[in-house]
Image (tube, grey):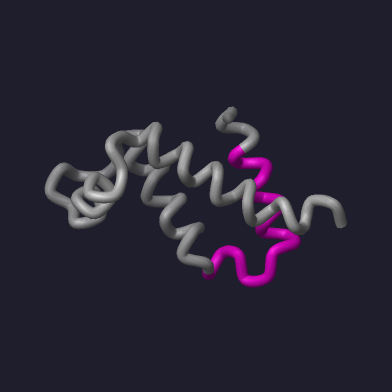
Amino acid sequence: MKYLDLLWMSDWLKRYYPKYYSNELMLLADDILKWFHEELPEDSSTLIYLKSLYDSPSDALRSLWKEIQLLTGSYWGN
């Protein structure tokens, strides 16, 4: 997975997937990217929650990428 691919697919979903930006996946993506770039404070509840779900920021990004691929798979052929 490349970071640009992730951004491109997110943009594609924004255009063609109904209400994508109100989706919980987009909120999770935003939090994961903040974690990856170390923008979350150590005592934030978001960081604690993400650490309870994923072992590392790279694991979280891989999981997010798989979810985005699943979402775009059904729309990709259209």
Q: Using residue 32 as the reference point, say whether residue 19 is left or right of it.
A: right
Q: Is residue 22 above or below residue 73?
A: below
Pinpoint residue 22: horizontal percent, then vertical percent: 53, 69
Name the chief secondary structure element in magenta: helix
- Residue at the farthest top position: 2
Tell me the residue at 15%/43% (across/down). 42
Q: Which residues are magenta?
A: 6-22
Pinpoint residue 23: horizontal percent, then vertical percent: 52, 67
- Residue at the farthest left position: 43
Pinpoint residue 17: horizontal percent, then vertical percent: 69, 64
Q: Using residue 36 as the reference point, say whether residue 13 is left or right of it.
A: right
> Is residue 8 found inside the magenta-colored segment of the image?
yes
Q: Using residue 77 as the reference point, say whether residue 14 is left or right of it.
A: left
Quadrant for the N terminus in the image? top right
Pinpoint residue 72: horizontal percent, then vertical percent: 69, 53
Q: Using residue 64 as the reference point, say whether residue 31 is left or right of it.
A: left
Judging depth in this view, the residue of 64 and 13 nearest the camera is: 64
Tell me the residue at 63%/52% (across/down). 70
Q: Is residue 27 above or below residue 22?
A: above
Quarter holding residue 7:
top right
Q: Is residue 65 above or below residue 49?
A: above
> Is residue 44 found inside the magenta-colored segment of the image?
no
All told, the count of numbered labels is 0
Tell me the residue at 18%/52% (across/down). 44
Judging depth in this view, the residue of 43 and 75 nearest the camera is: 75
Quadrant for the C terminus in the image? bottom right
Tell me the residue at 62%/32% (across/down). 4
